[in-house]
Image (spheres, grey):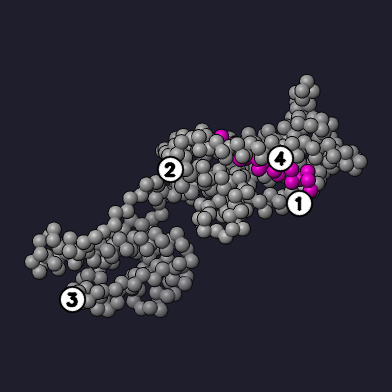
Amino acid sequence: MGEWAPGFARAWQRERRLWARRPADWLMFSLVPLAAVLLTWSLFWAGTPRGLAIGVLDADHSAVSRQLTRWLAAAPGLRLAERFDDETAMQRALRRGEVMAVVWLPAGFSRDLKTGRGAHAALLHNAQFATHSGLIQRDVRSVVGTLSAGVEIVTREKRGESPLGARAAFEPMHTALVAQYNTSLDYEPFLATTLVPALLQIFAMVAGAWGVGRELRDRTVGAWVSAGGAGWAALAAKWLAPWAALVAVQLVFVAGLAGVRGWQPAGPLWPVLGLHALMLAVYLVLGSFAALAARSLRTALSAAGFVTAPAFAFAGVGFPLLAMPAGAQAWALVLPLTHVLAVQTAVWQMGAPGWRAAPAAAALLAALVLLAAACRVLLPRVANDGRAWGRR
């Protein structure tokens, strides 16, 4: 242990000299991740999607169809971008993406509505864009349902029913939908807070693979080990700066979300932030382990891409984990990101207590110790090969 501090100091000085000669290495785990996080965050500043472009094909040209069109235009989530005169123009606009959906009011719409034969308004939507489609369906159903209810109640009142009786007869049984979490359907605290850790875990593993793999590619492992010793000092000096920089980026994001945007998590911040820091350390060390095990920068970077790039798709945020095939579930459960985002959602979105992070933290800590120990075992062997290569 007495040799650890001087060895770490020498290895750290060597890392600083490398960054001075190769500033792109330093940018890769500091300013580039920060820029990527800010860009991703900016996508969700609107919070709730609004102004989704729709069109109306009004073949009825009645007072009721015009009123429905005005209500659709006034819906906050929709933007009436086009009024079509024929089906050909409507289909062309849908295919070109000029509108995401079209409300088709057929001829006789008002007559059928007033005579009680059941009027039908068709919604043609582009189901390739599931989020757009779902939001448009929700708003169109709300507008059509409100207008339909109003017409039916007025009709019943004209037949002599009391206003209260007309409302009860029109809807004798109804369902109360009570949202428990994310009641405002705000995408910023829901998606931004999950995408940022998904981005940073990519940078962490790439940084670990690059830091060690660059030494392998340049055949400078011998110089690296000579500076810090073939032990923990050399590895710690290689890992400290990328890990600290990525943790700082995560903290900047959370501070901005809470301080600037006014986000208030339902549960405590620090247990989840500690879990993020552990996760980044695991991915960083995993990247270094891949480089040392394969003794190849190219293979390590390929492994980093294979493990981290699709990890968000398996995390159960965009698609339910329970609905995945058994093989996909098994792969998802191996990935640290899956467990971190599950705890984060429970604590920050649903208000679960902070101790819910403890099992995941223990598992990450165990993985970190095992991976770091494997790197410690592999480094002297790789260093001996590096000395055999020599430095030309």
Residue 237, percent from left and from top: 73, 32
Q: Which residues are magenta?
A: 272-294
What secondary structure prevails in the magenta region? Answer: helix
Amino acid marked by disc 3: Thr
**Nearer-N-terminus badge (1/2):** 1
Mark 3 closeness class: few <14, some 14–19, many ≥20 residues within 10 Å: few
Q: Which residue is mark 4?
A: 371
- Residue 38 drawn in magenta: no
Residue at image point 55% right, 58% down: 324
- Can you tell which of label 1 and label 4 is closer to the viewer? 4
What's the distance in space between the residues labelled 1 and 3, CA to CA?
72 Å
Residue at image point 76% right, 31% down: 232
* Marks 1,2: beta carbons within 8 A: no
Mark 2 closeness class: few <14, some 14–19, many ≥20 residues within 10 Å: some
User: What secondary structure is found at the residue carrying circle 1?
Assistant: helix
Q: Is residue 92 above or below residue 264?
A: below
What's the distance in space between the residues labelled 1 and 4, CA to CA?
17 Å
**Nearer-N-terminus badge (1/3):** 3
Does residue 262 appear left or right of residue 314 in this picture? left
- Residue 293 drawn in magenta: yes
- Can you tell which of label 1 and label 2 is closer to the viewer? 2
Amino acid marked by disc 1: Thr
User: What secondary structure is found at the residue carrying circle 4?
Assistant: helix
Amino acid marked by disc 2: Met
* Residue 161 visible to an observer of this rendering: yes
Q: Which residue is mark 2?
A: 350
What's the distance in space between the residues labelled 4 and 2, CA to CA?
32 Å
Q: Which residue is mark 3?
A: 115
**Nearer-N-terminus badge (1/4):** 1
Residue at image point 45% right, 67% down: 127
Q: Which residue is mark 1?
A: 299
